Amino acid sequence: MRMIPQSILVTGATGQVGTELIASLRKIHGPEQVLATDIHPPDSGMNGGPFELLNVLDETGMRRLFERYRPTQVFHLAALLSAVGEKQPQKAWQLNMEGLLHVLRLSVEFKVEKVFWPSSIAVFGPLSPKKNTPQNCIMNPHSVYGISKLAGERWCEYYARHHGLDVRSLRYPGLIGWQADPGGGTTDYAVHIFHEALKTNSYRCFLAENTRLPMMSMPDAIRATIELMEAPRERIRIRSSYNIAGISFTPGELAAAIRARLPGFRINYLENDPRQEIADSWPESIDDTEARQDWNWKPAYDMDRLTDAMLKNIRRNRTFVHDL
Ligand SMILES: NC(=O)c1ccc[n+]([C@@H]2O[C@H](COP(=O)([O-])OP(=O)(O)OC[C@H]3O[C@@H](n4cnc5c(N)ncnc54)[C@H](O)[C@@H]3O)[C@@H](O)[C@H]2O)c1
């Protein structure tokens, strides 16, 4: 089957998710079909495709880009994450809400075919069930990040219902990848730990040993995003955001998996880090029945595969850098 050429716009493209999503989208659609944008220029090349500076708070600049580029799909990633958001709550609310509303409004105006926007497990709160948290339950997020994601979900559903916009969303768990640094979330420890393990064979963890959180390998998250976007429209029954699950583990369990591969690996735990309070308000594990039923979601990475892949790829990238 011949694919109809797409014109894909990605915001926040130089961040942790964008770096890897851009590479996958360009592999599927061709480098020239995928425009990466961000408020900051990329550190290195953008996988050989186009890049433009774009501030998602500047609706006029965004409209100009939509006029010129006429996107058929938009992936709106620009946001302030949970831990940095708590330091600048006003800014987090403004960026996360206004940025999304600009994208939704312009997508209707320019008849964009499909929009992707990531929500987060941060939409849940202390009153939500902690284990196997279902798609629909009490949601009382404590962080401004979670509040903005929950409000964003309602806006997505509103635009789908009132404007017929084909907007699709996932509640990402903590994402663990080797290609880009995490951007200031509560689950960042699960990326940093691998880099420090290979550098110093030790790690000072900002979360407590037994803090269990839902996590996912970045390759699974990118595949989930693409599978959701490629699913037939009628299969997408949920227009707020889908629960998706990967792996749930604690810092203690992750340290043990690393120690099994790097003997002598040491970990100690910092006390009173503000991220602990956010983590304590989040679920331990997620029930993703609806995603499995509606568009056949299934994660591929378990704890062993994730640990092996992280160590192997970080090692390989470090060797590559040293070889230059
Ligand atoms: N990484 C995770 O574990 C995780 C988990 C749940 C949800 N998410 C969501 O996924 C999306 C991407 O997250 P990420 O981890 O890549 O975040 P990140 O912080 O690594 O990247 C966000 C990007 O947005 C850009 N940005 C900031 N302000 C901007 C503005 N005004 N205009 C345009 N760009 C701007 C930043 O420069 C950065 O490159 C976010 O919506 C986030 O909430 C991520």
Image (cartoon, rainbow, N blue to C red):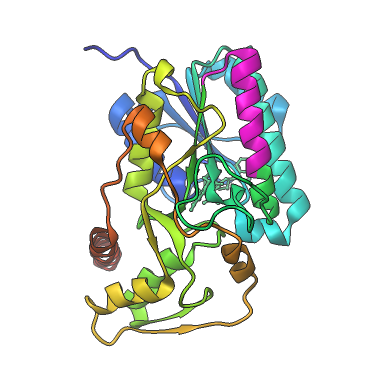
Asked if the magenta segment contains residue 160, the reply would be yes
Is 227 left, or right, of 156 in this rendering?
left
Residue 228, position as x, y percentages in the image: 39, 30
Query: Up-down: is 134 above or below 179?
Result: above
Identify which residue is drawn at 58% across, 41% down: 78
Identify which residue is drawn at 31% across, 83% down: 265
Residue 288, position as x, y percentages in the image: 41, 42
Instruction: Quadrant for residue 28, please give it.
Output: top left
Does residue 55 appear anywhere in the picture? no
Is 13 left, or right, of 152 in this rendering?
left
Residue 259, position as x, y percentages in the image: 27, 79
Query: Up-down: is 144 above or below 165?
Result: below
Query: Up-down: is 82 above or below 224?
Result: below
Instruction: Quadrant for residue 303, please give it.
Output: bottom left
Does residue 203 appear anywhere in the picture? yes
Front-most of residues 260 and 101: 260
**The N terminus is located in which quarter?**
top left
Identify which residue is drawn at 47% across, 46% down: 172
Asked if the magenta segment contains residue 56, the reply would be no
Magenta segment boundaries in residue numbering: 149-166
Front-most of residues 234 and 257: 234
Does the magenta stretch mainly form a helix, a strand or a loop? helix
Instruction: Quadrant for residue 276, please give it.
Output: bottom right
**The C terminus is located in which quarter?**
bottom left
